[in-house]
Image (spheres, coloured by chain):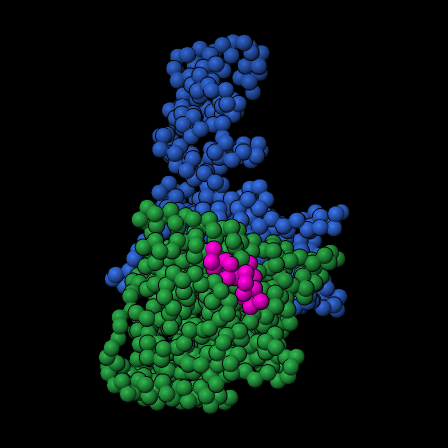
């Protein structure tokens, strides 16, 4: 039960009171990682360094001087964040074996707060994808595939078919991090979010996924996909925990010129009881093509929940939503083409054996190092950046982006506090079904509900809401005003309390329980 | 034969004189051991981000102001993409859309017909000044079929100064660059030493007939000194004229100047026309500069640059210095040019003037004719002169007091060059160069001479 616990209210207290030690916690997480290896959530497990960090944390607790709530807490980090001394691969052949000499700012902050870094989690190669299926280390499996809830609902199609072929995806691209948190192998994980890459897998894996406002958290050390949209994402088991992580990570970083200068004050979330002053906006365009009737119903139910509690619930319009996919495609591929130009095999990473000339070495290295998805985006991006195309595509897309961002400004200006939308079009698809379509098609479909927040730089959070008919998690998304994370998370926390999302019943975790706590029925309480 | 009008424009890259690079904290230093001044960002390690160096921005603002430019209060950074071994990120961060300074001018002077006494002032328009990164250096080792890459220079700050095609020949180009060099050195924004790669000049050259549109231009690179600049430009003008007069055409190509052969040759053009796929640099917000009027009240001074503040603190530019020298000392304009042209010479001159009663108009002759020619003969800089301003002033004082003749003074000076530590007075005494002032003594000497040459005297008296 210690592992199922939620860090802010339970584990921290337990650590402080000595009911469990950081080393024990770390060891249990490491053991669980081993026994859930089939999930393929981790690319690298940093066992030795993690145990060392846990020991150091233990010393601090013994002295009565813990660094804070995060001291001794096992965390995982998506493998596109630089970690000094620990391999950083971005799930790509291009960076296999690459050991960075520096820590990303967010990683350093976690370590400075005493967190224990268990390892690096799996992703789509270079964070390009919405399934966590397109990395060189193979796909990540959604822990819910092995849950009692899912197994009870799934009808085996034939004798020979077992859970091996029936497993569902985590969503992506931060699938490893979502799976790690969902399967209790860590208490929090870092993801990244460019078009929904933290919120999408959070929704599919039944965990909280927070995308902070662009400019709030440093990107120094996050290997970029789209510099103007990327943010470090936070994955936790409850909203309060997300607030704790946010508090330790947010703030100006001189090494990242796109972080705002203002001082950031970490906050504790109030327990909202009265929502009558709240105005919730329901953007009608988010009733997107392909939205499952199940999720539509849940969304509606959620809106009613707010209404019945006294909040003002209004339908709003974000008219340029339908252009966001194409706009995102142009801007994303253009920045990708640019960001990937540094991978030439010369200074670091994979270098081809081709020696005929510098050019041929570059070409061979990049062909060998990148998968189809990455190469496809580079080619598209370079096309859009050609002089003759620049105005037509890139500049046009920037203008459309401005329109999309303005849609949100107008809506928030009209008095709406927070928007409520679905996070995904449906629950998690089985892997065999998901890979029927190519990465680009899937990304275009799956990003539709999440990417506009990245275009506008707004904070957004996916909160686990209910289980689908197939027994899989469905999350709903709240989008807030720029830099108003406190308000956003306060609303999200209230909602979380109302819906009482069930705890995943995983065989593996049961085996690892050591009965420190009583059986917990829910994943959250305050 | 119809006359030809040559048109010359220049693209000049000046390395900014700063402690660290444009976007990273690694040091800037000439001739350091290879790859010893490379930060993670310079090596393009994934996840690193650029952070703008304040000093580099100030250097560009100073230079813009000195060149009479409008400083753009908002300028932008862009990525210019191409693949090359000395460009680790696969793109250079530059300012293509909106540079930091535009629409300036530079005045420079030329001697007509090589006569120092006839100088004309010309002006060349400055199109813009932009901040950008320098690349690393690659050395091609053909024997071992390998390329060695040194990234020490990668990321060093550059100011690219674009001069409009207002010049017409090598001499003008050289004079313009020389003046720019002096300005940069006076400001301290760049040391601008061409030999150390701190000032690189590319020339754009074309020719056309009067009344007709501009001809196709070529770009000439690999020019390593101001002297070679003049040669390269003149050669290229000539080459183009001959080519066209023989019925040929000029290709819009890049040519390298071969200093040994004194000609330009086509450079290996691997990819034809490059599309640099310019894109805004997403990691750097627009660069906002302020002036006294627009400066917000509560701004952190560390975070802002005030153009007016910089303007107030600009040192005297060479042209102003020259005017002051002419006005203060009554020397000729061409003298002031020579004084400023030689590092430290103006200071030396002023120092001598302070320490002597001799009029500056006379001192200048000693400086420009004697001192300077000696230094040039021995390839010494003013700093290395064995004759200090103190010693020279001392000598000139003797001359001024008529204790020695000017011929004697030259003799003393020759002795002083040896740098043996003797004072002018000591040398005068040693070599018995004193001028006699005593009338009687002079008569005695003359008498003695006459007495000694009786026959010649009689011949003279008889006519």
Q: Would you say residue A391 is visible in this rendering?
A: no
What residue is rendered at 61% in x and 77% in y?
A162
Q: In this view, does B332 lie above or below B276?
A: above
Q: How many badges with numbers are in the image?
A: 0
Q: In this view, does A267 lie above or below A71?
A: below
Percent across and percent down for residue B429 are 45, 15
Quadrant position of residue B244:
bottom right
Indicate yes or no whether the magenta region holds residue A517: no
Per the rendered image, the range of residues in magenta is A27-44
Q: The blue chain is which one?
A: B
**Observer-nearest residue: A390 or A435?**
A435
What residue is rendered at 55% in x and 18% in y?
B460
Q: Is residue A416 left or right of residue B341?
A: left
Q: Would you say residue A240 is visible in this rendering?
A: yes
Task: Name the quadrant of the C terminus of chain A.
Answer: bottom left
Q: Is residue A211 above or below residue A86?
A: below
Q: Is residue A182 above or below residue B26?
A: below
Percent across and percent down for residue A270 are 26, 70
Q: Is residue B114 left or right of residue B335?
A: right
Quadrant position of residue A12:
bottom left
What residue is rendered at 51% in x and 50% in y?
A48
For chain A, what colour was chosen? green
**Observer-nearest residue: B404 or B455?**
B404
**Observer-nearest residue: B275 or B396?**
B275
Task: Name the quadrant of the N terminus of chain A.
Answer: bottom left
Q: Is the magenta stretch mostly helix, strand or loop?
A: helix
Percent across and percent down for residue B134 are 54, 55
Percent across and percent down for residue B312 are 32, 53
**Observer-nearest residue: A286 or B157?**
A286
């Amino acid at each position: 039960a210690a592992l199922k616990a939620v860090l802010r209210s339970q584990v921290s207290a337990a650590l402080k009171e000595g009911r469990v030690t950081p080393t024990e916690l770390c060891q249990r997480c490491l053991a669980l990682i081993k026994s859930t290896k089939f999930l393929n959530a981790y690319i690298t497990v940093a066992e030795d360094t993690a145990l060392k960090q846990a020991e150091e944390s233990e010393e601090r607790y013994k002295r009565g001087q813990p660094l804070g709530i995060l001291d001794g807490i096992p965390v995982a980090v998506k493998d596109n964040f630089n970690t000094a001394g620990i391999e950083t691969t971005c799930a790509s052949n291009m960076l296999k074996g690459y050991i960075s000499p520096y820590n990303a700012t967010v990683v350093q902050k976690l370590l400075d707060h005493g967190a224990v870094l268990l390892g690096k989690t799996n992703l789509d190669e270079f964070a390009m994808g919405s399934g966590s299926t397109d990395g060189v280390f193979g796909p990540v499996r959604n822990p819910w595939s092995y849950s009692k809830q899912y197994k009870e609902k799934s009808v085996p199609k034939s004798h020979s078919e077992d859970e091996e072929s029936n497993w569902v995806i985590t969503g992506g691209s931060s699938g490893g991090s979502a799976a790690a948190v969902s399967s209790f192998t860590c208490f929090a994980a870092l993801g990244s979010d460019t078009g929904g890459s933290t919120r999408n897998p959070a929704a599919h894996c039944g965990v909280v996924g927070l995308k902070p406002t662009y400019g709030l958290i440093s990107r120094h050390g996050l290997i970029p996909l789209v510099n103007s949209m990327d943010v470090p994402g936070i994955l936790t088991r409850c909203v309060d925990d997300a607030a704790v992580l946010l508090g330790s990570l947010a703030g100006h970083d001189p090494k990242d010129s796109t972080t705002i200068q203002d001082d950031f004050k970490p906050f504790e979330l109030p327990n909202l009881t009265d929502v009558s002053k709240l105005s919730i906006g329901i953007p009608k365009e988010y009733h997107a093509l392909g939205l499952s009737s199940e999720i539509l119903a849940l969304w509606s139910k959620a809106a009613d929940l707010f209404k019945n509690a006294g909040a003002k619930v209004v339908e709003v319009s974000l008219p340029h939503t339908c252009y966001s996919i194409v706009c995102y495609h142009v801007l994303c591929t253009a920045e990708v083409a640019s960001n990937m130009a540094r991978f030439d095999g010369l200074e670091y990473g994979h270098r081809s054996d081709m020696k005929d000339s510098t050019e041929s070495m570059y070409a061979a290295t990049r062909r060998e190092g990148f998968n189809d998805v990455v190469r496809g985006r580079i080619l598209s991006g370079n096309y859009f950046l050609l002089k003759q195309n620049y105005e037509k595509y890139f500049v046009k897309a920037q203008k459309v982006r401005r329109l999309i961002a303005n849609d949100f400004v107008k809506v928030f200006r009209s008095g709406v506090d927070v928007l409520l939308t679905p996070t995904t079009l449906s629950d998690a698809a089985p892997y065999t079904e998901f890979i029927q379509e190519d990465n680009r098609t899937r990304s275009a479909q799956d990003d539709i509900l999440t990417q506009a927040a990245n275009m506008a730089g707004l904070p957004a959070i996916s909160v686990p809401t209910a289980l689908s008919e197939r027994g899989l998690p469905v999350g709903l998304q709240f989008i807030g005003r720029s830099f108003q994370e406190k308000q956003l998370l306060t609303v999200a926390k209230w909602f979380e309390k109302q819906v009482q999302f069930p705890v995943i019943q995983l065989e593996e975790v049961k085996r690892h329980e050591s009965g420190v706590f009583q059986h917990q029925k829910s994943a959250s309480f305050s | 034969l119809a006359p030809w009008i040559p048109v010359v424009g220049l693209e000049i890259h000046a390395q900014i004189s700063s402690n660290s690079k444009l976007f990273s904290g690694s040091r800037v230093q000439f001739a350091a051991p290879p790859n010893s001044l490379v930060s993670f960002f310079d090596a393009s390690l994934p996840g690193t981000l650029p952070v703008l160096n304040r000093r580099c921005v100030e250097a560009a603002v100073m230079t813009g102001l000195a060149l009479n430019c409008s400083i753009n209060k908002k300028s932008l950074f862009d990525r210019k993409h191409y693949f090359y071994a000395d460009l680790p990120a696969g793109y250079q961060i530059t300012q293509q859309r909106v540079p930091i300074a535009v629409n300036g001018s530079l005045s420079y002077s030329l001697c007509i017909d090589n006569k120092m006494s006839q100088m004309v002032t010309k002006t060349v328009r400055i199109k813009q000044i932009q901040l950008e990164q320098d690349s690393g250096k690659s050395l091609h080792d053909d024997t071992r079929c390998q390329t060695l890459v040194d990234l020490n220079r990668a990321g060093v700050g550059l100011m690219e100064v674009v001069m409009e095609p207002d010049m017409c020949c090598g001499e003008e180009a050289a004079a313009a660059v020389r003046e720019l060099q002096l300005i940069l050195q006076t400001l301290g924004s760049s040391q601008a030493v061409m030999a150390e790669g701190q000032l690189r000049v590319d020339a754009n050259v074309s020719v056309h007939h009067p009344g007709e549109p501009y001809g196709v231009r070529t770009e000439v690179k690999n020019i390593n000194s101001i002297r070679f600049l003049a040669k390269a430009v003149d050669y290229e003008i000539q080459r183009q004229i001959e080519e066209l007069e023989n019925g040929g055409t000029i290709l819009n190509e890049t040519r390298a100047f071969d200093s040994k052969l004194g000609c330009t040759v086509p450079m290996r053009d691997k990819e034809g026309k490059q599309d640099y796929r310019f894109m805004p640099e997403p990691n750097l917000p627009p660069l906002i500069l302020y002036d006294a009027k627009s400066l917000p009240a509560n701004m952190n001074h560390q975070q802002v640059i005030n153009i007016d503040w910089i303007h107030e603190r600009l040192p005297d530019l060479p042209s102003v210095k020259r005017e002051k020298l002419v006005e203060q000392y009554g020397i000729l304009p061409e003298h002031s040019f020579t004084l400023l042209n030689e590092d430290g010479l103006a200071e030396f001159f002023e120092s001598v003037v302070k320490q002597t009663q001799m009029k500056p108009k006379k001192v200048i002759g000693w400086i420009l004719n004697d001192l300077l020619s000696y230094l040039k003969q021995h390839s010494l800089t003013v700093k290395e002169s064995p004759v200090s301003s103190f010693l020279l002033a001392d000598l000139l004082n003797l001359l001024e007091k008529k204790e020695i003749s000017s011929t004697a003074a030259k003799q003393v000076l020759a002795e002083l060059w040896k740098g043996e530590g003797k004072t002018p007075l000591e040398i005068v005494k040693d070599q018995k160069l004193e001028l006699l002032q005593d009338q009687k003594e002079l008569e005695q000497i003359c008498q003695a001479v006459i007495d000694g040459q009786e026959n010649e005297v009689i011949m003279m008296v008889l006519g």
